[in-house]
Image (cartoon, helix red, strand yellow):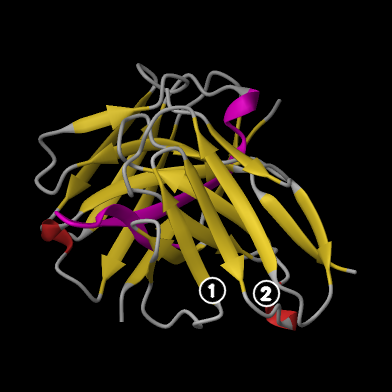
Amino acid sequence: DIQLTQSPSFLSASVGDRVTITCRASQGLGRYLAWYQQKPGRAPNLLIYAASTLQSGVPSRFSGSGSGTEFTLTISSLQPEDFATYYCQQLTTYPVTFGGGTKVEIK
Amino acid sequence: EVQLVESGGGLVLPGGSLRVSCAASGFTFSNYWMHWVRQAPGKGLVWVARIDSDGAGTTYADSVKGRFTISRDNAKNTLYLQMNSLRAEDTALYYCTRSAYENDSGSRNDHWGQGTLVTVSS
């Protein structure tokens, strides 16, 4: 199975901060990695796919980069509505796997 | 508007069975692969199973293989997950999710339902 390791697992930040989350894969994924945001009591919401393609309707402050085994999700200026948990996911090889999540909280 | 609405969750005894459903609308259901993903209380996302667009191909997580069966009825625009021999560790919110795919961008789960809670407890 492909393991996805996210770091950090917890992040405390202020409104307006630039935030970066890393996802490392145990095997190469090419560019096929997706990022999701999940707020408490809500279903996950797709933010980015193919490492850097912004899903329709997602604000441009979100961006993704990387390939192979290392990927990053960046929020350029954290907004109050961005406090949530973020997950990376690979669907290149079954079983599909998710990272352990990064919880972004208000400092 | 794409909508996925899960139902059928509830409390079940260990060793029992349950079938959860996902009613799809707002898109051509028969054109898409579908997945089930679960989330235990306070925990992360865990993929469970997938089914291709005509139902001929399925894949399961090792943790549910042989106990769970994913299926679909394209005439009814409905996805199912039959869960047998349930264990306490199967307790989770079960999400139905659509898989979009393009050759140059791969797959992703672009729409999710709100989930149905399955609790396995005596």
Check disc 2 and report the residue beneath it.
A82
Which region is colored magenta? B88-113
Check disc 1 and report the residue beneath it.
A62
Residue B66 x %, y %: 35, 16
Query: What is the three-letter code of the residue carrying label 2?
Result: Asp
Q: Quadrant of the N terminus of chain A?
A: top left
Residue B20 x %, y %: 41, 45
Q: Work out whether residue A88 or residue B51 is closer to the camera in this orientation and state it.
A: A88
Residue B52 x %, y %: 17, 43
Q: Residues within 10 Å of mark 2 (few under 14, many from 20)?
A: some
Q: Work out whether residue A48 or residue B99 is closer to the camera in this orientation and state it.
A: A48
Above/below status of B85 relative to A81: above
Q: Work out whether residue A22 or residue A97 is closer to the camera in this orientation and state it.
A: A22
Chain of the residue where label 1 is placed in the rendered structure: A
Mark before the other along the chain sequence, 2 or 1: 1
Q: Which mark is residue B28?
A: none
Chain of the residue where label 2 is placed in the rendered structure: A
Residue A45 x %, y %: 49, 66
Q: Are dots 2 and 1 on a single chain?
A: yes
Query: What is the three-letter code of the residue carrying label 1?
Result: Phe
Mark 2 and mark 1: Cα distance apart in space: 10 Å
Secondary structure predominantly adopted by residues drawn in magenta: strand
